[in-house]
Image (cartoon, rainbow, N blue to C red):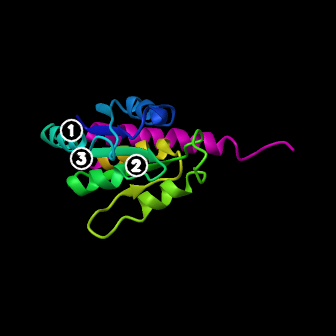
Amino acid sequence: MQVAIFLGSVSDKSIMKVTAELLNQFNINYKSYIISAHRLPDILSKTIKEIESEETDVIIAGAGLSAHLPGVISSKTIIPVIGIPIYCSNNNNSLGGIEALFSIVQMPKYVPVATVGINNSYNAALLAVHILAIKYQNIRKLLIKFREKEKEKLINKIKIDL
């Protein structure tokens, strides 16, 4: 397995699905888990040990509100962790995802989490692809082609009629 995807809650599934879709485009193997860092800490620790034994290269973790999941995972492994702050629209106490962003981006020293924008699971997946492209030549080739295609799309939009 190359990537492990963690969700803090089933309500995060629609945001995190984008991550899986992009990883599929690059033929990247992944497994996904819904584990609350607060409610199931023992199961989270056990799962991290399992994915370490499977030689996982990158972890992507999305969480909302207090958003401790990415940081807790980072504290338990040396596998790089990419955190996605998730806006919880179904919670009246939510601050628009800012609380999750601050929780993930403000990690203490020695417990790093690479953090993307609120709900930006696409960029989290793309960052994982970049990390994997260092080690895997096939992913590197696909990434170069992907970047060229995206560049072409932008070039084709330069000239417009107003």
Mark 2 surroundings within 10 Å by alpha-carbon count, few (fewer than 14), some (14 through 19), many (20 or more): some
Residue range highlighted in magenta:
133-162
Of the residues shown, which amino acid type is indicated by label 2? Leu
Which one is in front in this view, the residue at disc 2 or the one at disc 3?
2
- Of the pair 161 and 107, the residue shown nearer to us: 107
Which one is in front in this view, the residue at disc 1 or the one at disc 2?
1
Residue 156 x/y as whole percent: 67, 40
Which one is in front in this view, the residue at disc 1 or the one at disc 3?
1
Q: Is residue 70 left or right of residue 15?
A: left
N-term mark: 2 or 3: 2
Residue 8 x/y as whole percent: 39, 41
Q: Which residue is mark 3?
A: 135
Tally of numbered discs = 3
Question: Residue 47: which disc?
Answer: 1
Q: Quadrant of residue 98?
A: bottom right
Of the residues shown, which amino acid type is indicated by label 3? Lys
Q: Which residue is mark 2?
A: 127
Q: Is residue 3 above or below residue 102?
A: above
Residue 84 x/y as whole percent: 45, 48
- Of the pair 6 and 125, the residue shown nearer to us: 6
Residue found at x 44% / y 59%? 103
- Whole-number angstrom distance, CA of label 1 to CA of label 2: 23 Å
| Quadrant position of the C terminus in the picture | top right
Q: Secondary structure at mark 2?
A: helix
Q: Are marks 1 and 3 in contact (CB under 8 Å)?
A: no
- Whole-number angstrom distance, CA of label 2 to CA of label 3: 14 Å
